[in-house]
Amino acid sequence: MAQDDLKRAVAQAAVDRISGHFDGSAVIGVGSGSTADFFIDALSPHRASIGATVASSERSAARLREHGLPLVELNEVQTLPVYVDGADEIDAGLSMIKGGGGALTREKIVAAVADRFICIADASKRVEVLGRFPLPVEVIPMARAYVARQLAAMGGAVRLREGFVTDNGNLILDVHGLTIRDPVGLEQSINQIAGVVTVGLFARRGADLLLLGTPQGVVQFERR
Ligand code: A5P
């Protein structure tokens, strides 16, 4: 089964899973990336019964608009019952590496507001230990070199994502070669570095539910 078919299947499974919120008033948080794109496509037929959506990137916002889905700013929203997004890696504790598309900061903010985080991913994203996928860190431009030195001291090989500027006007450093055995601890440590806007480790607030697309079908994992 092609990877896109697995992504499409988990996107549809997420829509089925959240259909109880299609009551004309609930706001749905929508993530970023190719799996989230399939989720937006699967949401589209339900546009008349969705109160509104909040997007975690300009790219997702544009796709939501193209589909005629109602879109509001996060600041206009009091509650967000659910946020659906992909991941670059996810472990057994439902901690994730995110930000391969560079949208990590807005993703983390929307995830923080949401009551429930549903991660949708194809089977290739499920790992025993996080770190094979380079860990993205969004930094304020003037702090780039300092933060890179601090991250290197933590044991990673740090590379600037060339030619890339985030939706927030910042830079991304990708940290290669980490073996992340304590995702919560590393998330906290990197967050402490002056100049770091966001680290793409989603461990303190991981996913509540993983819908994993496998060739045998969609498998569910609840956060323990
Ligand atoms: C975007 O910045 C990311 O966090 C995505 O959620 C992540 O990269 C997954 O993307 P794909 O669904 O394209 O693999």
Image (spheres, rainbow, N blue to C red):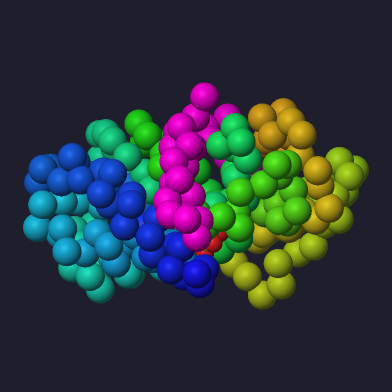
Left or right of 157? Residue 223 is left
| Viewer-nearest residue: 208 or 56 | 208
Report if residue 223 lies within the magenta region: yes
Q: How far across and down, in percent of the image, does residue 59 sit?
A: 41, 68
Q: How far across and down, in percent of the image, does residue 173 sit?
A: 72, 57
Report if residue 97 lies within the magenta region: no
> Which residue is painted at 71% across and 72% down in the image?
162
Note whether residue 55 is visible: no
Note whether residue 129 is visible: yes
Q: How far across and down, in percent of the image, does residue 157 sit?
A: 86, 55
221 to 151, vertically: above or below: above
Quadrant of residue 169 in the image? Answer: bottom right
| Viewer-nearest residue: 88 or 1 | 1
First to last magenta residue range: 199-224
> Which residue is painted at 56% across and 55% down in the image?
123
Q: How far across and down, in percent of the image, does residue 2 sit?
A: 51, 72
Left or right of 137? Residue 30 is left
| Viewer-nearest residue: 46 or 214 | 214
